[in-house]
Amino acid sequence: MLRTFSKIHGLAGLRVGYLIADPGIITTLRKIRAPFSVGTLAQSGALAALGDPGHAAQVRARTLRARAELTRLFEHAGYPVIPSQANFILVQAPDEHALVSRLAEHAIAVRPGTALGIPGPVRVSVPSQRGLRLLRSALRPTPGRPPAESCRRTETGSP
């Protein structure tokens, strides 16, 4: 069993997790892992997260609220969203690369589905409140054209 502290503990930047496995598997993995791959700061953060069960509940509640708002913003802008139980959503875009570019203009980093082996949708992680504000601005319709239309390919293949 392999677990990360990225999602439920809100420690994505620390890149820390744990593994419970057969001793033979652990021995093999120790041969290929980088030395000192988890620093003391990450270890301290992980231990603190484990020692505070209320923290995980707060992260979960915040993630659920933000995911619902994220879904609502995209759907209101005309983008269908694939239902999610994770800390990200998959947004159906007429042109995934045009949507990725549009969001990047507003400092919002997302992953096109082609990069994940699933062409079509765009993976959008549940953002902070600041990220939701940026997204509201990015999805605001341009005069005479809603956002989903502005990310549709023309005959030449450009937005």
Image (cartoon, rainbow, N blue to C red):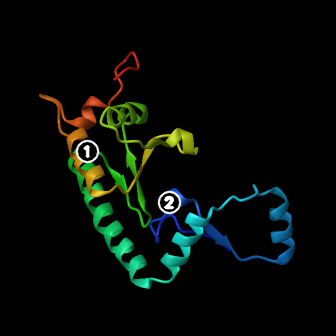
Place residue 37 in its image quadrant.
bottom right
Q: Gap between marks 1 and 2, in whole Å?
A: 20 Å
Q: Residue at x 50, y 56 (%)?
A: 13
Q: Dot 1 surroundings within 10 Å: few (below 14), some, or many (20 or more)?
A: some
Tell which residue pokes out farthest to the front in this image: 40
Check the picture and name the quadrant holding the N terminus.
Answer: bottom right
| Residue 62 horizontal side relative to residue 86, left or right | left
Observer-side mark, 1 or 2, equals 2
Q: Earlier in the sequence, mark 1 or mark 2?
A: 2
On the picture, is 113 further left or further right than 38? left
Q: Amino acid at mark 2?
A: Ala
Callout 2 secondary element: helix
The residue to which callout 2 is attached is 12
Residue extending farthest top = 156
Checking the image for residue 84, the label placed there is none
**What secondary structure is found at the residue carrying circle 1?**
helix
Q: Which mark is residue 134?
A: 1
Q: Position of residue 112 (x, y in %)?
A: 47, 40
Task: Give the residue at x 38% y 31%.
Answer: 101
- Marker count (numbered): 2
- Does 53 appear above or below 46? below
Residue type at mark 1?
A: Leu
Quadrant showing the C terminus: top left
Q: Position of residue 104 (x, y in %)?
A: 36, 35
Q: Is residue 60 left or right of residue 68?
A: right
Nearest the eye: 146 or 128: 128
| Viewer-closest of 158 and 7 | 7
Query: At 75% across and 55% down in the image, what residue appears?
Result: 34
Above or below, 41 relative to 140: below
